[in-house]
Image (cartoon, rainbow, N blue to C red):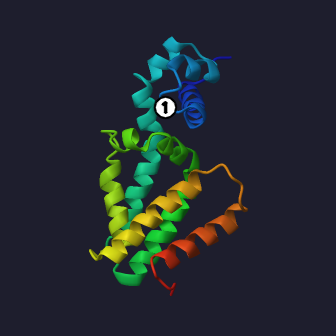
Amino acid sequence: MARSVSAMRGQILESALRLFAVHGFRGTSLQDIASDAGCSKASLLYHFAGKEKILTELLTPARDALATLLDRVSGLEGGRLVEEAVVGYVDLALRFRREIRLLFEDIAEMSCHQDLNVMELADGLLDALAGRSQQAPSRVAAWMVLGAVFITSATDDEVAPDEVLRAEMIRSALRTLDHTPS
């Protein structure tokens, strides 16, 4: 029985995400993805014009979720802004772990991906984590949180159950930002 177009696209994306996370974007060929998805390379190319298009489709939900978070906190200030930004960022990082592993594989190349505006969103998140402060201590702490949450969520190490990991990531991030939760 033939798979529906949407089922085939979904299988291709799932295979690509799994293979990219293990072998990297560059280390995975279109044929690797097609074989894993159980289709021909021609069928894969019918659905996606190439690996770049697959990558864009894989990362778009995470990008959109980050943009939504930034919209949600845009009207907040001070401690409430910092707290909401930290909780939202940790939740997104845990939700999109496999995508973050993919980004982590080649952060320089992925952050410059034209269709995703990664750097613009990262700047917005950094600003929110710093409580919109331009002071060096706030900015440095925000960079540290940005990187630490990213790296922690990208690890395969099962350090703790997700609920414990989430709580500790939030607590540690707020402490790094010298913020006491309200």
Q: Which residue bears the numbered disc 1?
A: 25
Q: Residue at x 65, y 65 (%)?
A: 165
The picture places residue 161, in percent across and down from the top left corner, at 73, 62
Residue 73 versus residue 154: which sits nearer the camera?
154
The picture places residue 150, in percent across and down from the top left corner, at 50, 56
Q: Is residue 73 visible?
A: no
Quadrant assignment for the N terminus: top right
The picture places residue 163, in percent across and down from the top left corner, at 68, 66
Q: Is residue 56 above or below residue 158?
A: above
* Residue 53, quarter of the rendered image: top left
Q: Is residue 102 above or below residue 5?
A: below
The picture places residue 28, in percent across and down from the top left corner, at 53, 25
The amino acid sitting under disc 1 is Phe
Q: Secondary structure at mark 1?
A: loop
Q: Which residue occupies the extreme left position in the image? A: 134
Residue 62 shown left or right of residue 101 in the figure: left
- Counting labels gives 1
Q: Residue at x 37, y 57 (%)?
A: 67
Q: Residues within 10 Å of mark 1 (few under 14, many from 20)?
A: many
Q: Is residue 113 above or below residue 182?
A: above
Q: Residue at x 63, y 71 (%)?
A: 168
Residue 127 shown left or right of residue 20 in the figure: left
